[in-house]
Structures are given as structure tokens and as C-alpha cells.
Image (cartoon, coloured by chain):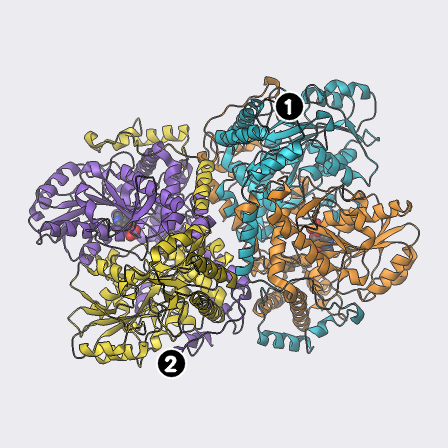
Chain colours: A cyan, B yellow, C orange, D purple
Amino acid sequence: MPFIPHTEADIRAMLATIGVSSIEELFDEIPATLRTRELTGIPEALNEMQISRLMHVRAQQDGTPLNFVGAGAYEHHVPAAIWEIVTRGEFYSAYTPYQAEASQGTLQLLYEYQTMMTRLTGMDVANASLYDGASALAEAALMAVRANRRSTSARILVPASVHPIYREVAATITGGQNLTLEVLAYDRQRGTFSPQSLDSFTGEDITAVVVQQPNFFGLFEEVDAITDWAHANGALVIAVVNPLSLAILKPPGEWGTKGVDIVVGEGQPLGVPLSSGGPYFGFMATRKEHVRQMPGRIVGRTVDLDGKPGFTLTLQAREQHIRRSKATSNICTNQGLLVAAATIYLSLLGSRGLERVAAACQRQTSTLVRALTRIPGVELVFDGPRFHEAVLRLDRPVAPLLSALAERGIVGGYDLARHYPELGHALLVCATETRTDEDIELYASTLAQLLGR
Amino acid sequence: MPFIPHTEADIRAMLATIGVSSIEELFDEIPATLRTRELTGIPEALNEMQISRLMHVRAQQDGTPLNFVGAGAYEHHVPAAIWEIVTRGEFYSAYTPYQAEASQGTLQLLYEYQTMMTRLTGMDVANASLYDGASALAEAALMAVRANRRSTSARILVPASVHPIYREVAATITGGQNLTLEVLAYDRQRGTFSPQSLDSFTGEDITAVVVQQPNFFGLFEEVDAITDWAHANGALVIAVVNPLSLAILKPPGEWGTKGVDIVVGEGQPLGVPLSSGGPYFGFMATRKEHVRQMPGRIVGRTVDLDGKPGFTLTLQAREQHIRRSKATSNICTNQGLLVAAATIYLSLLGSRGLERVAAACQRQTSTLVRALTRIPGVELVFDGPRFHEAVLRLDRPVAPLLSALAERGIVGGYDLARHYPELGHALLVCATETRTDEDIELYASTLAQLLGR
Amino acid sequence: MQEPLIFHHSRPGRSAAAQYPADAVADVPEHLRRKRPAGLPEVSELQAVRHFTRLSQLNFSIDTHFYPLGSCTMKYNPRACNRLAMLPGFLGRHPLAPESLSQGFLACMFELQEMLKEVTGMKGVSLTPMAGAQGEFAGVAMIRAYHRARGDHARNEIIVPDAAHGTNPATATMCGCKVIEVPSLANGDIDLEALQRVLGPNTAGIMLTNPSTLGVFERRIVEVARLVHEAGGLLYYDGANLNAILGKVRPGDMGFDVVHINLHKTFSTPHGGGGPGAGVVGVGERLLPYLPVPIVGRDDDGRYRWLDERDLPHTIGRLSAFMGNAGVLLRAYVYMRMLGRDGMQRVAEFATLNANYLLARLRAEGFDPAYPERRASHEFIITLKRQAKELGVTAMDFAKRLLDFGFHAPTTYFPLLVPECLLIEPTETETKQELDAFIAAMVAILREAEQDAAKVKGAPYTLPVRRLDDVRAAKQLDVAYTEAESGA
Amino acid sequence: MQEPLIFHHSRPGRSAAAQYPADAVADVPEHLRRKRPAGLPEVSELQAVRHFTRLSQLNFSIDTHFYPLGSCTMKYNPRACNRLAMLPGFLGRHPLAPESLSQGFLACMFELQEMLKEVTGMKGVSLTPMAGAQGEFAGVAMIRAYHRARGDHARNEIIVPDAAHGTNPATATMCGCKVIEVPSLANGDIDLEALQRVLGPNTAGIMLTNPSTLGVFERRIVEVARLVHEAGGLLYYDGANLNAILGKVRPGDMGFDVVHINLHKTFSTPHGGGGPGAGVVGVGERLLPYLPVPIVGRDDDGRYRWLDERDLPHTIGRLSAFMGNAGVLLRAYVYMRMLGRDGMQRVAEFATLNANYLLARLRAEGFDPAYPERRASHEFIITLKRQAKELGVTAMDFAKRLLDFGFHAPTTYFPLLVPECLLIEPTETETKQELDAFIAAMVAILREAEQDAAKVKGAPYTLPVRRLDDVRAAKQLDVAYTEAESGA
Ligand SMILES: Cc1ncc(COP(=O)(O)O)c(C=O)c1O
Ligand SMILES: Cc1ncc(COP(=O)(O)O)c(C=O)c1O
């Protein structure tokens, strides 16, 4: 019996102790009419050898195409040490650290992680993770409504240059509550959100303004002006950031004169493999004054009976298991193991390594843009410095081209047709430090060929 | 500097403490004339991302062909748990357990391993590993010469049904000492060594007789008769066995009336991946009376200052670091990590699981033989029950066929032309529990096609 | 042994230099550029490996300890699931890779959906929720969408039993619903009369787990379902306790309209020290149109593809940027295939056998079951109310002392309505020997409590730290290491 | 915490059932069939995982502790080497796979051979020896083959310094040679006059490591080489200490004819609690024909292929069933590529810097260097002879007490000629902080020894066991757990 250790003798002895004659009898409180017959829809068991073979086949079936798509998930080098440590049983198979004394490893790691995130973001406190970047934005919106006591409108302004799926997820998750996410157009010339567009809201009751840096198109927003406008108008600022970019970009804690109020983002770039979209982790950081409105677990440092330092979950009164219907969020299980990966990643890279990786990504995206726009019929839509992403416009529909590229083992980018039809045949492309110049040349020559150039 | 943690400040402080002005100065005792210039033959460093890419390419380059070759290395299912545990830093990056108190994990594991090997082989004591099966046979021959005090001839009889490379390795390693390995012909009809061939040696001074069970052709030797003949004639018996087969075969400790004297073999089938031929491990077991002649490390159970049980290396006076030129062998570093893998393998499988795997291997080899001999022009050379291997004779040279199979992603077997030219166009094939009926059908149909059948 | 903070290992200028490109200069306009380095630790690769390896050793975990944490189903996480989910082909797949390059992966996901439908008795499944609580959110959001689609706008009350897990009421609130609590009876079953009193035109639905968090099976579940349905509400099944009944009785057959399943419980994906999990949702006929996207569909030609808003125009929408915790889903898929048809049923059987054995033995040793008349399901509650009063030794004290004996503590003080409770869930993957050793420890602690209560109250003694000051942690908030302290 | 034997976890009839085919019956003639089951442990998968995970935690290792074991070069084993050597494509490759399906693997091996030639200054390399000792065997066997090929049959004496590692004399014996010891001088260099006295027509060769196991560089190595060569002998370089001089001076340039390299030392493949290692050999012109096979060759068309007995008819032969420890070789290959040209030299530089720093500090703290006039190489010797006499505290006591401070002990009582010695090798991958902490521990122990020698002599106190009784282990031999005891 796979994974069941009971011997015949064990079973007999245990049944005798309980005082029943069969295991079946233990289910006698379940009404007989409800009992399940065979689960015919489940195949017979495979042993480990058989499932290994199957999974190897399935994993190989999809090949190892060359990736030129980002759009919120980035192929970075993941140091081997990370997952060799993270999958150690002591991290991998432990529960949430409810018994602090028996979980100091996880707790100290989380404390170190929180510290690193505060430093990266320039904020005071960070939680121990949310599900992913998109849901983190939703939580930030809900939090802003709680935290901005001066505002009663629950109106949140969201530029259309924020990741469109993030906006959708935020809409889904905040949908049950009386909260408005107002989408504001971006500047069609520059691909960024123009701080001037906020002027029409001056004097109104705005709860918060969201700004993504770099934005979905990979461009840099005028975060200082936006932040200052928001604060001047009683609104909080929610920053959505790529944590890797923070190695080179001004941290949200320093945006404008006062810095933002809530920072969220997707932690995947920090040592987490692409893995079909998850598990990743969302991060969130804020100012000390808002910490009690923050959702998610927080680890604190304290002392033990002997005065020795140690770590424990703290401020649990915000959480569902204590506060129940009045909790800051319903989140319980979060993305702990991914945070462990990120903590090791940040430790290995350090400030300097992170900066180099970020810079290399910038360089490779530039190389990519140069190589592709050299092809007649391919043009860059928005100019200027960027990170990771670039919007290209083609002279024909994107979808069939992406299919043709896929047949040649290239994942060519993200088709913007659904979310940004106004951009025409637009394609979002990305290169990270993992794309070599040769990879880029291969993409360019393949695309040129497909375009008949 | 990859893997070097020194900061500029560290270096300055350390040089100052030492009292030198540069690192270079630390090499001032090396004659200047000898100093190396640049190592131009070494390429520039790759970072981990770059070498990862290269190694992925190289690993993929060789594909994942279907294996039908054994000949001493067998593709078995390796439970995932094994290598996830074995590569834990505490096992992976520890040294030989010289400081016993700080190495109880490795030591207890080795003690458990030794116990398992004595049980599998039916012997009293086992060492903690030798390099591989072939070199273990060499060590066994040298040990037999030491252990058989009644014999002065240093003559060892080795049937030609013993793995030919094992015989070559034994010849290389024992070559410097006055020892004779006499190769005896096998029975050309049955593919096994006939105990009667020993009669011509009756009364002579024979130090030891080697017998491999199952033999190189996968056939079962008459181990009882051979063992009894040897003992009747003052010779020791060295058994070379496949440890997996011992789940179903009589253990060497029970061969004949007294059992054999030394058992060696290749441990690879016990949870060690094929990995191009190594690292594997050789095992050796013997009777208590010979333990002081046994090479290799041995772990013993003892007690600590408080009387608590614990484990330590023992009988070190046999070994090179104590006995130096009079040691039982020069072996120092052995194959510890592989032994850890085997110990976990044997624990997971248990007697029953091991028996099932062995039986499944037998079954699949039978299926393979049936499928291939159905092809006109392919015949089974030796009949009878077998384990793992079978010798087939083809109607044309084997080498070009193997090449053609390789092109089709099939490793079709081991060409016996070099070592057993007398068998004609003979091919040694193997199927383990990892070969499905479909795999076998694919091989058969491909071969039939290549043979134009 | 304690381990310093990673920041204490750090020295300016050090780094794991093999991990990043040697050169490359950032191109950022001056006013947007980071001015000072981020202050991340500067350590060598060995220092990082050693630090985090040492930290790991400070944890209890399934791979090292018996971990009978009630409601959490801490069972063996097969290593094959991890290994196979981490094959390069799976790890490297971008979530937006075209379907033509995703058929192997999608096949696994599709089959997982099918298997989950079968074990829950549901008609449709979405894999996207990233943990149980997000599954709950999806479920309640679908219930609301259903009522709304019918113009039934008044239905905004979610009924939960008093013993419900905190995520249930918190979820209801997140969905904009009002939470109505119903009490349970002394026998652990729901108070049906109380339930009837709160049912009405505002009832959106009820959230239940069965067996409940009290560790007993709600025997009148059919009646409950009838009452709720008659009142126009829907039934939500919190699948956290599915391990107890897998293959024995299905939520769909009990009358539930929607269920979430904690794959990290019943289907044994790891908890990872706090996640990731996966909280897939299954729905009956009525809620099919509202399932969150994306979902994997199969076309007539056998090709798999993503179903999205275009296929499910009434979907409640998306819950994550891509498809949820794919890697967790792969692990669950491997696990389910290894269990197979018969293995599924054995899960519930042996989980229940272990729980009832443990209960019988502990009771015989003088511990008080919270529901002495009832069978244990896969878990059960011991109340130490008597011991707390007589000996001054609380459930918390017992829990901490158990750590010294090498056992992770059961869940304490949940459910809230049972005083001084230990919620004990041994799971099916533990041996009788291990249970016997746990019982011996419980008995030893009870004896200690009788003879030397202070000893128990001072526990633990053998862990990296002694009992931690939680109050101080909350009062003197220290949630990030500060520069000042680091002397940097 | 101690962990019971796996046999104590075992119960008849239990097993990790996912790990083997459910059916299949063996087909073995009655008289050859096993009669009783083998008596292997019968445990569940979780029990096995838990048991061996717990066992692992009882070890010190590089990944958890500073491990300054002299002569063993315990430095960081980069995790990437393990990960990349274990890619499915490499793990699954059968050693007898045809060359057409092996070009990726063979390319790595060929390039490894080339890099090793470059760093040793040798003309040819064979990767096949499976550890240092087997490399030594190959080396001496080649030396013998060389003399024999010249008809020089009398040359059967191998000279080794008194400080030589035990494998050197043991190897010479294994090769059928006589071992002649030469003493070293008080300054650690070889006694040249003594050497000249033993050189002669029977001299096959000399085995040296440089820097020697005394931790100092043999300054007159050119002279030594000249003398030996003039006497008709060859020089063998024991590469165990190559870490000290990598990229600084090459054995070939010093005059050595043959060298083995412990890849598990200088090239950082793991020691694995006792192996596997790899003891590749490199040779100069004279010994090229004798290299053990197989070797990887490259044909003119750029294809790689195995060179065997047909290509090297004078080879000493084969040393393993296939090609040696391929997986170890892959790890070394990855490591060397990551170091690159400049990284190689840094290895020796920082290993030497660390050793000399540690030496300087320990000396300043009152410890006695065995060779006070000399530079340390990558390692050095402290002798506690004075402390042993004055305080009754031995090198062994220091070693055991260091464990309590969280440091693995240095090598003790080797080389044999230095009384009460600690051979300390910090390696280049340790930080100054770690060295400083080690020094602090050494000083603390010295203070303890002065004030409370019994405390030091009773160490260790904090490990899973206290000091073990080695004498009993050898006298009351218990090297396998017996049925009787298991009660089975
Ligand atoms: C009964 C019950 N419901 C819901 C949950 C929430 O699940 P998750 O932690 O995956 O969000 C849990 C888990 O803690 C639980 O035990
Ligand atoms: C100086 C010296 N020579 C030779 C050896 C033998 O190497 P191995 O253990 O790899 O056989 C060692 C290693 O212990 C050593 O330190």
C-alpha cells in the first residue's frame, strides 16, 4: 500500500484497541446512502517508476523553447544552491511556524526576508508573502481602503499601464466590496501614465493611486510627481514594482517627497523558476503606521524565557484565525517556500549582483530591440529607457506569427491585441540576462524569414 | 571572485597580520624559475548561468536512448527519495568520518549498510565499500592470498564466464605482485563453468577459485559444487555477485556445505544511476575469521564515555594510514556516498521489494529474448533460467547493427566479438524492470526492420 | 545552537560572484535611479549555503518529526512528487508559452481536473486558487454571482458553524457578505434548530467542512443540505478535511454545490513552512458558469487548450496573474496517479484508523475526549480543561513539552469553542510505533504535570530557544533588522 | 538526539510499496533459490526518509561547519556542480552507450583532460582512477612498466619521505615495490644527503607531494628531481596538495614524471562522507604509452571517441569496469569551467593567505608551529607537545573540544613524525570571520586546558555522543546488527 505503513498485525491490534472489528466500522456514522462506490474515474495506481517515465515524457514533450516573453514572469538564472536548500525536508515539509520554538529556521529566514524587502523597497515593514503579484495588488487596494482613514470614497485610480491581468485580478478580488478601481488612460505617445491626467481629480476624495514601475510596457513612470500629487490630495500611493528592478531604480520608499504607502509586486524574479506560472509569491511592504492594516503573516524578533533572541509570528490579531470575519484578509497558507528561495537568492546576489543582473537584462532587451527593429516592418512603439519589456509593432497580425515562431522553438512574445487593441499589431517582447546575443540573433533571423525579409 | 569570500579589507588586514605586503610574497619559497605564467590552456571563467546552459546542451545532445545493454551496469528505477537525501549537504559535503562524534550520521548509516550486506550475502562482515565491482575482485584476489595461510602458490582460478573486464582489471591491479590468475574455459554448450573442469586441479595448491553468479552471460553457475570442490582442495572461494539477484538467489554464505569465503560485487544496481559508469561502489563481505585481512573501512558499534551506544571506524590497523606499507590495501577514499544511496535503496525496497524487482527483471529479459528470437536470424545461444542478460547470435556482424540501432535511439546490447570471438556474431542483451513490453516491442520491430525481416 | 542573522555574516564587497554577469551598466534616468545600494547581505556562496542549511536544521518537519497538527494533514510528501514536478521541462515553461508547446503540461492539468471531479462528485473544477482561503473566496464569489445572476440581490448572508476555521468568516467578509454563526450541539453536530432560525431570504449559503473541525462527521448532512437548499441557499464544502472521507463519501453526494480542496493537505503537496498550497475549486451544475479562469479544456481532436473569459463569459474572473500554483498542481497530479483508484480510499481508511486508535489509547490513559460519544474522523479533540484546572498545566504547556519529546505539537486552542484543546491529526502515513511513542510522551507529560507542573510550564528545554515572549514580540515590534544595529 | 537503527523501525510486512512492481515471480532452480527473505529492513517510505534525514543531521559537513581538516582540502562544493552533473541526460547514460550517442558527455571529458594537462604541465591524462590511491597505483604501475620496458628489471624500490601519506607506501607495496623511507630535515625539507644515500640502481622512483604533508614547500625540488633522474628513477607527484600551488607552479615544471590529482580536493568534488573521489593521473612524455585506459580521444573530424588497448598497446590496463567515476569528473569539469583561467590561480593564493593568516594568529596566541621558520603553504602544523606535557591535554583532546565549539577538528596525529600535531587547512573558501572564530575557540580551549584540563579531556559534550571507546570497538567487534538482538 503506497505510503501506508500498516502491517496486518498493526491493523489487527489497532482495531482491537478501538474495539471494532473492521476499518469499515469506523465509518458507521456516515449515512449508508451517501457512501461512495468505486472511483471508476480514477486510473489504477502507477508505481514510482511508471509515473516517473510518464512525467519525463510529458516534460520533454513541450521541449525547451527559447523564451522572449515576460509580461510578468521572467526567465532568470536560478542559482543551483537555492532549490537544493529549499527542498530540504526541514523547509519543504514543515507547516506554517505555529510552534515558534520548533520552527526557528523558517522564522529567522522570514525575518531576514522581511528585512531584505524593506531595504529593497525602502519601506519600514514587509509581510511574509501573499499569493502572487496580482493578488497582492488586490490586497493592497483593500488595505488602502482600511488604512486611508481620511478617505471614505474607496475610489482607487489605476493607470492602464499597470499589468492588465493584475487589474483584472484586483477587480475580481475586490469585487464583493464597495470599492471602485478607476482605470486611467496612459499617454499614447510615451507609453507611460501622465501625472497631468491626475489634475482632473484634484480636490476629489481619492483613496489611493496605483502606479507600476517599470510599467507593463517596461517603461519608467514619473513616480515622483504621481506620488506627490496623491499625497497632496489625501490619497495613498500603491506601488507595483519588479523587485529585481529595484536594484537600479529608486525604491518606492523614496518616491516623491514622502515615499509611497504600500508596495506590492511579484517575487518570481528572485530565484523562482518560471514553472508554468507558479508557485510564485506576492510581496507587500508598507510604512510602520499602516502595519496593523497589512494582511499576511509577519515575523517578529523577541526573546525567550532566558532572554535569548528568537523569532515568532506576531501581530496575529490582524489575521483570520484570531480576528475571523474582521481580519485584514482571509489569507492563511501563503507562499512560504518561495520566500525561502527569494531570501537565498537575495543573499547570494547581494546588492551588487542584483544590480548586475538588472543591468544585464536592460542590455539584452536593448540588443533585442535593436535586432528586431532592424527588420523592415518591425518598429519600436515607445522610445526611452526601459526594463525587461518593449512594445513592437508589426505590419501584420501577431498571433499567426507567434504560432509560426513556436513551431521553430521560439516563444516570441506576448500578443497585446486583447488588452491594448489601440496599439495595432503590437507585441510585447522581453529579454533577460539569460538570453545571449546568439539567441537574439536567432530570433531576429527567424522572424525576418517569417516576415519574408 | 567565484567561491572566494575575501573583501579588500580582509586581504589588507590579513596581510598585515602575517607581515607581508602582498599575497605574492607568500609564495617566496617557490623558486622563481619554476613559477607558472598564465594558464593559457584554460578558458576564461563561465558564470553559473553560462555553464548551466552549456551542460544542459551537452546533456541533451546525447538524448535519452532506450537501453538494452547491461554487461555490469543496470538501468533500474532509482527512488526519488534516495538522491534527495544523499545530496543533502550533511552527507554530500562531509569527509570520511575520522571524528566519529561529529559523524554519527554517516557512521550509523555505514553500520546499517554493513548489516544489510551481511544479510544479503549470508556472510559475517562487510566493509564500507571499495571502488567498484571490478576492483573489488582484484582486492578479493589479493585478500585471498593473505587469508589462505595453507596455500603458498598464489594461484587463483577464474572461469572465463566471469565478466571479462573484471578479469582485466584484476590482472592490472594484481599485476605487480606474484599472483597468477588462471582463466578456465566455460562450457560452450551451456555457457556456464563446469565444476568438472576443476578435477584436473585436484590435489594442486590453489589459493582461491572465483565464481560469478549469475555469470557474465546471465546464467546460473553450479555454485555448490564449485564451492565444495574448492574447500575440499584447500582453496578459498571468491563469489562475484549481483546484489539485486541475491533477493532471489541463494546467498554465497550458503553455497556448498560451508559457504564461500569472500563475496564481492558491483553495488550499482542498488539505487545508483548509470551515470556513464560511475561513481558506483564495490562491496565486499567475508567470514569473521578473515576480517583482519579485509581491505577497506569498517564501522563498529561501541559505547561512549557515558555508556551510550555510538559508531566509529574500527580495525584501522589494517589500513594504510596506520599500517602504511603493510596495509591490506592502499585504498583510502572509497565510495561512501554511493553506499548511502544503496542503504536507502535497500531500506525502501526491503526484502520483498528487492525480490519483486529481481523477478520483474527476469520476466522482462525473458520477454526480450522471446521478442528478439522471434526474428528469423536471431537465436538464443544458451538456454535455461537466467538473470538480466542473454546471449543472442545474429546472422551478421553485430557492430554495424548496433550503430544502426543507435541512430534510431536504441542501445541494443554489448558486442561480444572482442572478448568472446568463439561465439560468432554474438550480442549480449539485457532488460530490467524499467523496460516495458512496448519498449521491447519497439526494439524487436526496429531490429527486424534493420535485418530486413 | 543558534545561527546569527545573515546580515551578521555580511561584509561590504563580498559576493557569490559566480551568480551574476561580471559587467553590464544600468541605464536609468538620474531622477529615477537608486542612489545607495540596497543593503542586501554580502556573503559568499558557501556562507549562504551554510547559513540556510543551518537554519533549516532548526525546524521540525514531516521529514524529521511526527507532526500531528490537527486540520493541517501533515502527512508524508512523497519525494517523487517534488522530483518530477521539478524536471527541467516543467520548470522552464513560461506561463504564456503557446499551447502548441504546452501539451505535455496541459495533459497533466486536464487529467488532474478530471480526477478531482471524480473524488469530489462535482461537475467542474478550476485549478487556479492558490490556497484554501482563495478557494473559499472563489466559492463564495461564485455563490454570490449565482444569486446575482438570478436577480436575488438580497442574499448576502453566509452561515458558518461556530467551530469554523477562521478563513471561512474572513472569506465571507472579503466577498462582501455578512457572517452568521450557528452553534454546534454538545455532540459536535450542528444545531439544526438554530440553523433553521437563521436561514431565510438573505441566506446566500452555508460553509461547512465535514467532518467538522471538531473531528466528527456531521451525521445529518443530508438534512442540512435540504434545509439550506429549501431556503434558497447554496452549500459550500471546505475541503480542508477531505482526507477523512476520500473515496468514502463525496461532497457532491452530500449535497454540496461547491467545494475547495487543499491539495497541500489531502493530496500531500508540501506545506513549505507556510505554503505554497493550492485550493482548487469544484462545482456542481449550478455554479459551472462562474468558475474562475483559466481552466484546461480538451478539444475534439484531443488537443488541450486554455479556456478563458471567452469560453466562460460568466466567470467570476481571474485570481492570479497566470494559472495559480502550477508546480503544486503537478505534485498533486503525481501523488494522485501514484495512489490510484484504490489508494484514494485507503487514505481515509488509515487516517481514520490511526485517529481512532490514538483516541482510544489516550482516553484509556486518562485524557478527556471533547466528544466522547463520537467516532473520531481523521482527527479528534482532547480537552485538557480538567488538567488545567487541577494542575495548572494548559494545552499550551503540553504542546511545548511535547517538543522536548521530539514531537511536533497538535493544533492548540482551535477550534476556539473547546477549552484547552488539542486537535490531533496523525494522518495515514504514520506507523503504530510512532503513535505509541507519542502516547507514551503524552502520558509522561501528564505524570510530570502531576508531580512537577513547573517543569512542564517551563518547556521547551531542548530546542534552539526556550519559550518565546509573544507579548513582547507584538508590543516591541521588531520585524526588520535595522542598519543602526548592523553597524553598517 | 539519537536515532534508532533502521532495523528497529522495521516491522514484518511493511514496505515502501510505490517503489517496486506489484507482481512478478522469480524463476530460479530450486537448489539455487534463496530460502529465507534477506532480512532487510521493512519500513515505509516516510520512515526511511525520516530516518536518513535525521541521521544526516548528526554529521558535521562543509555545508554546515568549518572543517579545516589538513591534507583533505575541505572547501565549498559548489551546488551547481552537483545539479549539473545530475541532469537526466548524464544520469541516464549507460557506460557502454555507443560513441554516436555520447558526444556531449565525451566533449566534457576531453576538455577536462586538456585542462588537467595544462594545470599540471603534463603531456597526457587518464581520468579513470577512482581516488587518489588508485591514481598512485596507476602512477607507480606506469613507472614499473617504464623500467620494465627498458629491461631495467632491478628497479623495484620506491622512495617516500617519512612524512608521506599512508597511501604512498601502501601503493608501492601493492605494485610489488620495496618502500624506502627518507627523513626530512628540521626545517621540513627533505634530507638530500639521505636521499642520495638511498638512490641507486634499484631506484624505481620517488613519491613526493609538494608542498609536503608538513605544510611546507620543498624548496630544493629541482635538485631532488635532478638527483632522482640522474639515478635513473622517476618522480611521482602526489597531487593531494595541488590546491596549494594551482596556477603558481606546475608538477611538470618541477620535474615530475607523473602526477595524480585528487579532484575531490583541488577541484572541489564532494567527499561524500568517504567518497567518491577521482584520482586522475597525468604523465610526461616518458610515461605516455603506459596510461591506463580508457582515455577520450578526438579524431580529426572533431568527433570524440574512446581510446583503449588497441590505441595504447602498452597501457598498464584498466582500473575499473568502465571509465571510473564519471559523475565526479563531470563535477570537476563544471568547477574548473567556473573557475576559469584566473580563478585557478586565486585558489592557491587565497588558500595560502588563509593558512598563513591562521598560522600567524595562532602563533601570536601562544601555539607552537611545527616549522616556525617556514611559510605555511595551504596548510600548516601546530604541535601541542608542550601543552601535552605541561597540561596533560593532547591534540586529541583539543580536537574533541573543538567539536563542542562548532568546528570540525583539524587532522590529528598526521604526519606521524610531528608529535601531538594538528594539521590545519582552512582552504580558500572560508572567510576571515570564520578563521577568527576558530582562533577564538582555540584560545578558549587553551585557557580551559590551563584552568580545567579535565573539562577538555572529557569533550565533546554537545554532540550526539560523547567520546567513543575505540578500543572496545576493535576488541568487542560489532560490525553488523544481529538477528538475535533485533528479536526477529
Ligand atoms: C478547516 C480549514 N479550512 C480552511 C483552511 C485554509 O486553507 P489554506 O491555509 O490553504 O488557505 C484550513 C487550513 O489551514 C483549514 O484547516
Ligand atoms: C597527501 C595525500 N596523498 C594521498 C591521498 C589519498 O587520496 P585518496 O583518499 O583519494 O585515495 C590523500 C588523501 O587522503 C592525501 O592526503
| Left-right relation of C304 to B217 | right
Q: Give the mark toward the camera: 1 or 2.
A: 2
Extreme front residue here? B452
Give coordinates of residue A171: x percent, y percent.
77, 37
| Left-right relation of C327 to B108 | right
Give coordinates of residue C107: x percent, y percent.
63, 51
Residue C85 visible within the image: no
Give coordinates of residue D184: x percent, y percent.
16, 45
Q: How many marks?
A: 2
D474 relative to A316, above or below? below
Circles 1 and 2 on the same subunit:
no
Q: Amino acid at mark 1?
A: Phe
Picture residue at 52% right of the left edge, 74% below the top: D12
Q: Chain of mark 2?
A: D
Residue C474 picture quarter? top right
Q: Which residue is mark 1?
A: A220
Q: Nearer the viewer, residue B49 or D346?
A: B49
